[in-house]
Image (spheres, rainbow, N blue to C red):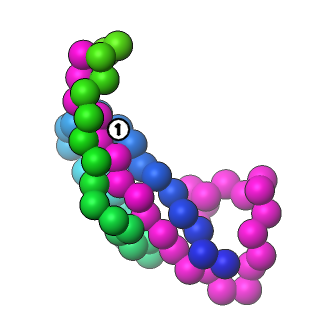
Amino acid sequence: MKLYRFLTGPDDSSFCHKVTAALDKGWHLFGSPTYSFDAETKTMRCGQAVVKDVEGRDYEPGIKLSDF
């Protein structure tokens, strides 16, 4: 199965660590990162899509993507 996640976070090192942790677990960047202003919190937010191929498993809506 091919898994897809969209990681989001504040524009600080915690977001970079989140993406780095996903890459370390075998996820791959998918597309370009996004960057936008959150008017409610008055902060910048980042986003990055990641994908991963997992052999021998079938997709189920209840799976926890961060476990892979």
Q: Residue at x 28, y 48 (%)?
A: 34
Q: Is residue 56 left or right of residue 66?
A: right
User: Residue at point 39% right, 43% down?
Assistant: 8
**Image point (60%, 75%), residue name:** 2
Q: Which residues are magenta?
A: 42-68
Residue 48 image position (x, y, % from top left):
35, 54
Give the residue drawn at x 43%, y 64%. 50
Residue 18 included in the magenta stretch of the image? no
The part of the image, by quadrant, that contains residue 39 is: top left
Q: Looking at the picture, does residue 37 appear above or below residue 60?
A: above
Question: In this view of the protein, can residue 1 be seen by the observer?
Answer: yes
Disc 1, SS: strand
In this view, the residue in front, 27 or 29, is 29
Circle 1 is placed at which residue position? Answer: 9
**Whole-percent x, y for residue 45 in the image:** 29, 34
Q: Is residue 65 above or below residue 3?
A: above
Where is residue 46? Give x, y as percent. 29, 42
Amino acid at pointer 1: Gly
Residue 60 % position (x, y): 79, 63
Q: Quadrant for the N terminus, please.
A: bottom right
Q: Quadrant of residue 49?
A: bottom left
Above-or-below relation of 10 to 60: above
